């Protein structure tokens, strides 16, 4: 009983930190969105439709960063066999999957306005689709194992596989001939707004990642207690 009470106290305290950070993160993201619509200049060719670029690029970079972080956490698990590391790995994988999907959706909308097509098998788009598929496979495989350490091992291996796709996405426009611009021309104001957007969305996804990690660890603790009670 004392162990259960301690678990509740331990899990409740960190959630207060997430709650405290929610308002500053919301203000940061709100400010970034305001800059997108109020400060960023209207693009001459695409008009206001180009503003989705600020979201598209932000979620894309957040997705790549999350996949890299998931791989690092996976390596930490394989080295130390700590489920705390796997908690980070799973949380980052889920956020990476979410960002990849958002990247594909916003990219399709932007592509329709820029190239008059919703989808094309362009190198960067295709490699991002592959990354989303790898993240999906990671989560599906995790769900097929009940033992947390089996989930952690398979998750770490697939996360390392996903990392291999990241350089391909980043360098796709330089290695292959595609319709993505290699060095898009942007004004100083546009670049400043883009940086603000990346920071705002990064703060949001980091907050969600931390919340999800705590949720995963709490679930592992509950499962561990249930197994101990069953064995007794």
Image (cartoon, grey):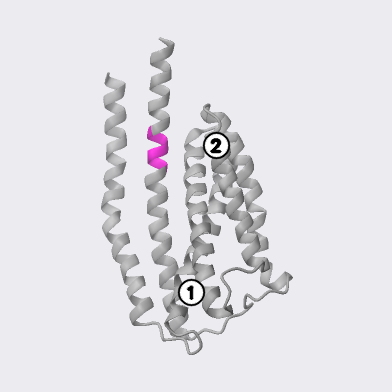
Q: Main secondary structure of the magenta part?
A: helix
Q: Which quadrant does the C terminus fall into? A: top left
Q: Which quadrant does the N terminus fall into? A: top left
Badge 2 local density, few (<14 within 10 Å), some, or many (20+)? Answer: many
Considering only vertical position in the picture, is 71 above or below 152? below
Badge 1 local density, few (<14 within 10 Å), some, or many (20+)? Answer: some
Picture coordinates of residue 47 (x, y %)? 45, 85
Q: Is residue 57 visible?
A: no
| Residue positioned most to the front | 117
Question: Real-space Cα distance between discs 1 and 2?
Answer: 33 Å
Write the residue at 50% across / 64% down. 105
91 is within the stretch colored magenta: no
Write the residue at 26% across / 58% down. 23
Picture coordinates of residue 129 (x, y %)? 61, 58
Disc 2 secondary structure class? helix
Write the residue at 56% across / 70% down. 118
* C-beta proximity under 8 Å, tags 1 and 2: no
Quickly name the residue at label 1. Answer: 53
Write the residue at 44% across / 77% down. 51
Q: Is residue 42 visible?
A: yes
| Quadrant assignment, res 185 | bottom right
- Mark sitting earlier along the chain (1/2): 1
| Quadrant assignment, res 175 | bottom right
Considering only vertical position in the picture, is 184 above or below 205? below
Q: Which mark is residue 142?
A: 2
Picture coordinates of residue 193 (x, y %)? 42, 77
Q: Nearer the viewer, residue 2 or 183?
A: 183
Which span is picked out in magenta?
Answer: 213-218
Considering only vertical position in the picture, is 86 above or below 202? above
């Amino acid at each position: 009983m004392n162990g259960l009470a301690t678990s509740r106290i331990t899990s409740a305290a960190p959630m207060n930190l997430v709650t405290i950070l929610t308002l500053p993160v919301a203000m940061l993201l709100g400010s970034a969105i305001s800059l997108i619509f109020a400060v960023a200049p209207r693009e001459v060719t695409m008009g206001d439709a180009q503003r989705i670029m600020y979201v598209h690029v932000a979620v894309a970079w957040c997705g790549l960063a999350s996949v890299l972080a998931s791989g690092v956490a996976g390596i930490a698990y394989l080295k130390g066999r700590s489920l705390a590391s796997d908690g980070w790995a799973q949380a980052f994988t889920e956020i990476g999957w979410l960002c990849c999907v958002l990247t594909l959706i916003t990219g399709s909308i932007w592509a329709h306005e820029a190239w008059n097509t919703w989808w094309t098998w362009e190198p960067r788009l295709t490699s991002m689709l592959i990354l989303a598929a790898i993240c999906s496979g990671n989560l599906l495989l995790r769900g097929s194992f009940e033992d947390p350490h089996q989930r952690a091992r398979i998750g770490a291996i697939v996360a390392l596989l996903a990392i291999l796709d990241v350089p391909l996405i980043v360098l796709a426009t330089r290695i292959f001939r595609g319709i993505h611009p290699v060095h898009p021309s942007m004004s100083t104001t546009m670049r400043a707004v883009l940086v603000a957007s990346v920071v705002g969305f990064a703060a949001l996804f980091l907050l969600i990642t931390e919340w999800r990690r705590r949720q995963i660890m709490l679930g592992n603790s509950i499962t561990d207690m249930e197994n101990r009670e069953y064995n007794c």
